[in-house]
């Protein structure tokens, strides 16, 4: 596999040039890649910062003339995968995708669906690889229809692969429907979200039931039907699969080895939620061992359900968010437990007299518009002064604490999408390592306590040596697993290679605890730290109480760079999805299924050829 450090323009060179000023643009800037140049145009495609314009790619032969084709730069969320020029097309209909697939097969090209590019893993393109014979199919521009069947049993929404989560739940809300468990970025395309097993940070509060039509597992568990372009024995063609077809299960989380054109998903009654933020709980209290007194993560999950901690580096008090399904707007600090008094968690000292009602998402504007002092620090950390991370974390904490107060956002209430979406294109863009610990709800505190104690010890160890390999926050979230009982249509089972798939041999395992650590791209020693952390997590959470699964969209298989540990890619990753599940529905059957649907591997790349040969 091509190293992540071998692009035409080096990642570190791009980020470090110009220190603070360029760091702000590179890490925090807008989402639109470099401008597009239509096929056949005499114009050149500007490079992402190299000394001259990027060389034009050879024009694909016999390309369908009525499908828009252009060259455009590619960059993923953290800008660690950047290509100066790729071929991009914009199919208008599913039938266009069929024509593209057959054209790609006949002309020995690859066809890769391209959504919001909000990811880290090289599932679409590989950094530094030859993309002369790769066509990226933009799904966002045209394949974005959304249609709701509110009278079905269950109610459903059918969306094109390029429809964003924000667009889908906005349409659902018109019919008093929604999803109770959403990822933080609403910009994700549904096709991309399903490819990587996207999930939220929600669980039912202790003793609460999952409402019909909802799931606290991943979005993949909501799928009732999908349509994809697959090989039919003689050509690529559209085919629709129902949830009761065993062949659909590997497609529900597919890593881009399938090209979905549309998907139908169940929905439930829309819910009102309250999100309360805390910045006054010491990390050792919040992440205490099981059964400890005080305001612990364990108690937040029990009494609220949804919970997320963002622990900035070299600070003592994380930003703790707790989501509670709350039908009526809380009007004061002394309201009932269901609306946020939090029982044993104590009074909401310092909170507003009542929740602030919000009518749209992305309510933490302070995290989307960073001051110059922060962007200057980002530049400094990757330009020879990594020790400034000791100031970066505390400043981010202060911005959060003051921002919550200034925007009256520490206690908000609204529809589910409006309090769960909070990551925008202008949010600080960092790289991530970590994954999911699948375990029982009773084990939440132990898992988090062990990890945070290990992490704190290692960070302090490196600080004593004058090294600062990590400078971003720790993010800790929980969600449920893809329970069969949540699916309200006849179903063949759970998504085959989802991190949120239940283990039949451990029926008590019912949660996934997401433990991720973020860092500024280009930080010296970062990947080595991620490698150490990944090895510890694989060893520590590998017993009768828990197992570890990487998060598909984030960093994993760390060697000198992410996605380079051949043993994890070829041996340990497959073993993760063989353990505790039937041989009739595991990693091997999923790989066989992908190769049946796409025997010519037009939906693959050289990284996927290693992971799923």
Image (spheres, rainbow, N blue to C red):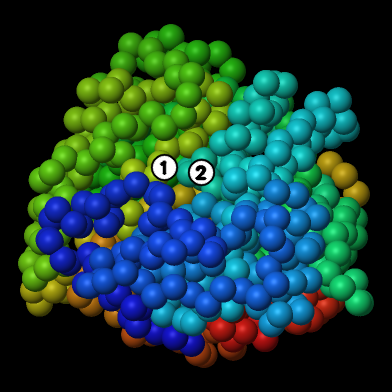
The foreground one among 298 and 90 is 90
Rendering coords of residue 589 (x, y %): 79, 78
**Residue at image x 67%, y 86%?**
613
**Do callouts 2 and 1 mark residues in contact (Cβ within 8 Å)?**
yes
Question: Which residue reaches farthest front?
Answer: 42
Rendering coords of residue 502 (x, y %): 70, 61
Q: CA distance from mark 2 to mark 1?
A: 9 Å
Left or right side of 125 for 597: right
* Numbered mark located on residue 237 in the image: none
Rendering coords of residue 175 (x, y %): 72, 21
Instruction: Look at the numbered disc 1 and give the secondary structure of its residue.
Output: loop
Q: Which residue is mark 1?
A: 423
Which one is in front in this view, the residue at disc 2 or the one at disc 1? 2
Instruction: Look at the numbered disc 2 and give the secondary structure of its residue.
Output: loop
- Is residue 291 shown to the viewer in this render? no
Against 110, residue 33 (above or below) is: above
Name the N-terminal-most of marks 2 and 1.
Answer: 2
Q: Which residue is mark 2?
A: 187
Label 2 CA crowd tier, 10 Å (few <14, some 14–19, many 20+): many
Left or right side of 339 for 315: left
The foreground one among 337 and 552 is 552
Label 1 CA crowd tier, 10 Å (few <14, some 14–19, many 20+): many
Left or right side of 316 for 95: right
How many numbered marks does the figure carry? Answer: 2
The foreground one among 383 and 465 is 383
Left or right side of 173 for 546: left
């Amino acid at each position: 596999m091509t190293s992540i450090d071998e692009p035409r323009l080096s990642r570190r060179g791009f980020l470090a040039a110009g220190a603070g000023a360029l760091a702000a643009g590179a890490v925090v800037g807008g989402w639109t890649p470099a401008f597009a140049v239509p096929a056949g145009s005499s114009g050149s495609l500007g490079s992402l910062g190299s000394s001259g314009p990027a060389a034009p790619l050879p024009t694909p032969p016999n390309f369908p003339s009525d499908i828009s084709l252009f060259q455009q730069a590619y960059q993923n969320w953290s800008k660690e995968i950047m290509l100066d020029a790729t071929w991009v097309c914009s199919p208008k209909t599913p039938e266009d995708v069929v024509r593209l697939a057959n054209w790609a097969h006949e002309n020995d090209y690859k066809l890769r669906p391209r959504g919001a590019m909000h990811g880290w893993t090289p599932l679409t393109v590989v950094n530094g690889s030859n993309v002369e014979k790769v066509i990226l199919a933009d799904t966002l521009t045209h394949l974005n229809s959304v249609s709701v069947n509110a009278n079905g049993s269950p109610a459903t929404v059918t969306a094109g692969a390029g429809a964003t989560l924000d667009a889908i739940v906005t349409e659902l809300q018109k019919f008093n429907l929604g999803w109770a468990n959403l990822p933080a970025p609403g910009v994700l395309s549904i096709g991309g979200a399903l490819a990587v097993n996207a999930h939220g940070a929600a669980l039912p509060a202790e003793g609460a039931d999952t409402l019909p039509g909802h799931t606290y597992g991943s979005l993949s568990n909501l799928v009732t039907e999908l349509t994809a372009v697959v090989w039919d024995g003689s050509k690529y063609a559209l085919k629709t699969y129902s949830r009761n077809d065993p062949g659909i299960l590997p497609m529900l989380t597919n890593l881009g080895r399938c090209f979905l054109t549309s998907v139908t998903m169940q929905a439930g009654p829309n819910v009102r939620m309250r999100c309360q933020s805390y910045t006054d709980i010491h990390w050792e209290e919040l992440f205490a061992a099981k059964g400890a007194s005080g305001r612990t993560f364990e108690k937040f999950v029990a009494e609220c359900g949804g919970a997320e901690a963002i622990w900035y580096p070299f600070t003592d008090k994380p930003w703790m968010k707790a989501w509670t399904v709350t039908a009526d707007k809380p009007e004061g600090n002394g309201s009932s437990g269901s609306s946020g008094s939090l029982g044993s968690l104590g009074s909401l000292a310092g909170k507003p007299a009542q929740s602030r009602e919000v009518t749209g998402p992305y309510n933490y504007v302070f995290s989307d518009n960073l001051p110059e002092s922060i962007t200057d620090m980002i530049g400094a950390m990757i330009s020879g002064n990594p020790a400034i991370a000791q100031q970066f974390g505390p400043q981010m904490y202060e911005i959060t604490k003051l921002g919550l107060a200034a925007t009256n956002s520490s206690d908000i209430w609204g529809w589910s999408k409006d309090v769960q979406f909070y990551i925008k294109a202008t949010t600080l863009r960092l790289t991530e390592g970590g994954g999911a610990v699948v375990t029982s709800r009773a084990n939440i505190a132990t898992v988090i306590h062990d990890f945070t104690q290990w992490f704190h010890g290692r960070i302090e160890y490196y600080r004593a040596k004058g090294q600062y390999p990590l400078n971003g926050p720790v993010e800790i979230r929980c969600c449920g697993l893809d329970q069969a009982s949540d699916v309200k249509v006849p179903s063949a089972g759970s998504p085959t290679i989802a991190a949120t798939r239940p283990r039949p041999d451990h029926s008590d395992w019912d949660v996934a605890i997401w433990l991720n650590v973020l860092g500024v791209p280009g930080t010296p020693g970062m990947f080595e730290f991620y490698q150490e952390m990944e090895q510890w997590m694989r060893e520590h959470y590998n017993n009768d109480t828990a197992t570890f699964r990487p998060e598909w969209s984030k960093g994993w298989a760390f060697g000198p760079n992410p996605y380079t540990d051949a043993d994890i890619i070829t041996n340990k990753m497959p073993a993760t999805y063989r353990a505790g599940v039937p041989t009739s529905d595991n990693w091997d059957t999923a790989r066989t299924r992908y190769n049946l649907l796409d025997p010519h591997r037009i939906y693959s790349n050289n990284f996927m050829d290693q992971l799923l040969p």
